[in-house]
Image (spheres, rainbow, N blue to C red):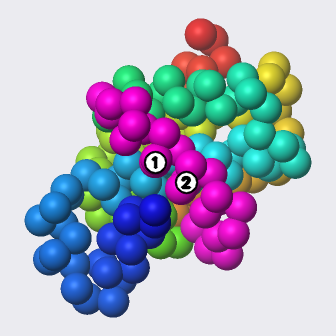
Amino acid sequence: MRAQLKSLLARLTGSEAESDEADPTADVRYATAVLLFEVARMDQSVEPAERSLITRLLKEEYGLDESALEALLADAEQDAKTATSYHPFTRALASRLSMPQRVGVVEQMWTIALADGELDVHEEHLIRKVAGLLYVPHKAFIAAKLRVTDA
């Protein structure tokens, strides 16, 4: 049930080779999903529209089948509730994604934050923090926000 978390922990403890051989993109998918759920949770609840949007974004980005997508969503949503740090997730993304891909994650986070038509200060704070941990320049952070608000 927690295959993605086990993969992340394996990488952090040095037994990375085994988890990466199975599926090198699993950590990226999982880390992205957790961060998207974390944005959705910032205003104290994950609305059905936010969950649906997270599902659509992940399906479009990674082309997962329904069962893999549901498993990823279930694990990521649960782990977003219990995570004590964003560092393992941002580290997985920063080490595996190019700058345009990292900016894409930030843009997805803006999409979730603005899904309900309101931007909570906690949502913006989280996105700003994650963008910093992903080494996304401020200019790209703002450009991502503007692309989402203009859409």
Q: Horizontally, is 73 left or right of 93 in the view?
A: right
Q: Quadrant of the C terminus?
A: top right
Give the amino acid type for the residue marked by disc 1 in the picture.
Leu
Tell me: residue 4, above or below residue 41: below
Question: Could you say whether the residue bearing mark 1 is in a helix, strand or loop?
Answer: helix
Which stretch appears magenta?
Answer: 63-86
- Label number found at residue 135: none
Q: Horizontally, is 69 left or right of 75 in the view?
A: left
Residue 142 falls inside the magenta stretch = no
- Label number found at residue 72: 1
- Residue 35 in the image, given as x and y percentages of width and height: 57, 52
Tag 1–tag 2 contact (CB < 8 Å): yes
Q: Which residue is mark 2?
A: 76
Question: Could you say whether the residue bearing mark 2 is in a helix, strand or loop?
Answer: helix
**Residue drawn at the location 63% of the way across and 12% of the way down:** 150
The local crowd at label 1, few if under 14, some if 14 to 19, many if 20 or more residues have their Cα within 10 Å, is many
- Residue at the bottom extreme of this rendering: 13
Residue 134 appears in the figure: no
